[in-house]
Image (cartoon, rainbow, N blue to C red):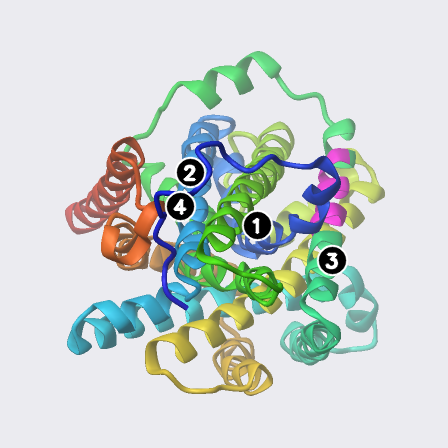
């Protein structure tokens, strides 16, 4: 499906938005947003909040601003061209570049899928593991059973798409709502210092001790695999619009422009909802554990929240982690399918993709490695993989031959490149600190 070029008889005014239509366009950005509140965020945010209090809240604010821009551009590329980002890379870049980008994308997809699947298993463990420990099971055995349960749940969620993409969107949006409600309840149970929250949200503060967690939070918030996915999530509505009768170039342009404006609202709402949830994680961790280093932020947080804030707080934490793990693992599998099909031009079963990505996570659990450390390390890997998704996205959306009338404006273009510079600078700073240490 080629990009739409405006003709001289196109209407000078933008198509009018109708509030009655808005809800039907809500969904793609909320599916993408679940990757911004996945178990990697739990690990990085609780670690950062426990170690440094409110000091890293500014990272989430600026990461969210970048996420809004990036997800909007990913959606715009999909709407303007009718193709996913991986497919556009295959069509417009040399084959060696495409293969390199595919490898980088696969690394990011595997890293995030492992983190999300481990998070789902940890969620089951925190909710039900204590009972099995009483019967003589060890932690590794319980986590392996939890991993199998998580896999079955993810397969069931993925199967919803067989009844239509909207069913799957609604399920993921339901998970987002549950996670948001859990953290709203957590916020009611603590007494945060609102003055300190405002200060550290607006004023950047970072040093050699906090840079590792700051970069991990960036990698957990701005996710490379979901950049590829968002360009695919807009395709079902686009295809439905193209199937309408009397679809002239003028009507196509107006329909895509309307679609893009609705998707901009979807992105703004979904990304800000994810930002509030991420901020709540740091606030809860800072209020409950500020200034203390937790050996295992997820398990120690769950174990300590009960005595500090009541058993309900620990349950809310575990429920939110479980919902995050299940839904984000589903989204990660969808992203993996988009990546392999787009870059390699092959048809690949989403259920087979899920089976293949189970192997590394099961191996980590069976080996007895600390799931939390794997979670945080995976987020740093994602941060390093991020430029390899951002740079192609900006090159494509800034190319008039690819985008037609939807090519980036000058301000949008330079803000995008500024985002790339910031991400790369943070990554090199982390690398330099690691070598110096």
Image coords of residue 241 (percent x, y): 59, 60
Is 317 in front, or is 93?
A: 93
Image coords of residue 7 (percent x, y): 35, 48
Element at badge 4? helix
Spatial CA span between label 2 and label 4: 10 Å
- Reading the chain from its start, which is encountered first: label 4 or label 3? 4
Image coords of residue 264 (percent x, y): 52, 40
Q: Relative to 122, does residue 200 appear above or below in the rendering?
A: above
**Span shown in magenta:** 176-184
Residue at the spot of label 4 = 70
Quadrant containing the N terminus in the rendered view = bottom left
- Reading the chain from its start, which is encountered first: label 2 or label 1? 1
Is 192 in front, or is 130?
A: 192
Element at badge 2? helix
Neighbourhood count class around disc 1 (C-alpha, 10 Å): few under 14, some 14–19, many 20 upward: many
Q: Are marks 1 and 3 in contact (CB under 8 Å)?
A: no
Whether 180 is among the magenta residues is yes
Residue at the spot of label 3 = 170
Spatial CA span between label 3 and label 2: 26 Å
Q: Quadrant of residue 66?
A: top left
Neighbourhood count class around disc 4 (C-alpha, 10 Å): few under 14, some 14–19, many 20 upward: many
- Res 63 label: 2
Query: Is residue 75 found left or right of 131 in the rendered image?
Result: left
Residue at the spot of label 1 = 29
Instruction: Identify the residue at horizontal 27%, vertical 55% (top origin).
Output: 396
Q: Are marks 3 and 2 in contact (CB under 8 Å)?
A: no
Whether 17 is among the magenta residues is no
Main SS of residues in magenta:
helix
Image coords of residue 29 (percent x, y): 57, 50
Element at badge 1? helix
Element at badge 3? helix
Residue that extends furthest to the top in the rendered view of this protein: 195
């Amino acid at each position: 499906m080629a990009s739409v070029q405006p003709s001289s008889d196109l209407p000078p005014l933008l198509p009018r938005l109708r509030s009655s239509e808005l809800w039907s366009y809500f969904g793609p950005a909320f599916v993408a947003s679940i990757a911004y509140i996945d178990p990697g965020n739990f690990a990085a945010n609780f670690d950062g909040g426990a170690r440094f209090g409110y000091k890293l809240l500014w990272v989430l604010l600026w990461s969210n601003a970048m996420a809004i821009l990036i997800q909007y551009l990913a959606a715009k590329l999909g709407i303007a061209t009718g193709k996913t980002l991986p497919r556009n890379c295959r069509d417009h870049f040399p084959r060696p570049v495409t293969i390199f980008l595919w490898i980088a994308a696969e690394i990011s997809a595997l890293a995030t899928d492992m983190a999300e699947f481990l998070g789902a298993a940890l969620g089951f463990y925190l909710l039900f593991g204590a009972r099995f420990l009483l019967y003589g099971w060890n932690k590794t055995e319980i986590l392996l059973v939890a991993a199998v349960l998580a896999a079955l749940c993810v397969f069931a969620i993925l199967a919803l798409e067989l009844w239509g993409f909207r069913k799957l969107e609604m399920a993921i949006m339901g998970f987002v709502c549950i996670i948001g409600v859990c953290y709203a309840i957590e916020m009611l149970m603590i007494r945060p210092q609102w003055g300190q929250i405002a200060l550290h949200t607006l004023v950047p503060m970072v040093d050699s001790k906090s840079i590792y967690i700051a970069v991990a939070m960036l990698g957990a918030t701005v996710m490379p695999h979901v950049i590829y996915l968002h360009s695919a999530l807009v395709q079902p509505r686009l295809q439905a619009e193209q199937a309408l009768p009397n679809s002239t170039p003028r009507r196509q342009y107006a329909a895509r422009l309307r679609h893009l404006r609705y998707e901009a609202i979807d992105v703004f709402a979904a990304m800000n909802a994810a930002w509030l949830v991420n901020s709540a994680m740091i606030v809860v961790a800072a209020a409950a554990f500020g200034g203390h280093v937790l050996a295992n932020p997820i398990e120690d947080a769950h174990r300590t929240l009960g005595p500090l804030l009541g058993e309900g707080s620990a349950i809310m934490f575990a429920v939110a982690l479980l919902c995050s793990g299940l839904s984000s693992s589903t989204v990660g599998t969808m992203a993996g399918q988009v990546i392999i099909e787009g870059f390699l031009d092959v048809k690949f079963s989403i259920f087979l993709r899920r089976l293949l990505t189970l192997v590394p996570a099961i191996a980590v659990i069976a080996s007895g490695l600390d799931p939390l450390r794997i979670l945080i390390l995976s987020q740093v890997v994602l941060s390093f993989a991020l430029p390899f998704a951002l740079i192609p996205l900006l090159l494509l959306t800034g190319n008039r031959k690819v985008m037609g009338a939807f090519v980036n404006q000058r301000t949008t273009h330079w803000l995008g490149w500024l985002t790339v510079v910031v991400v790369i600078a943070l990554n090199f700073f982390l690398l330099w600190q690691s070598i110096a240490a």
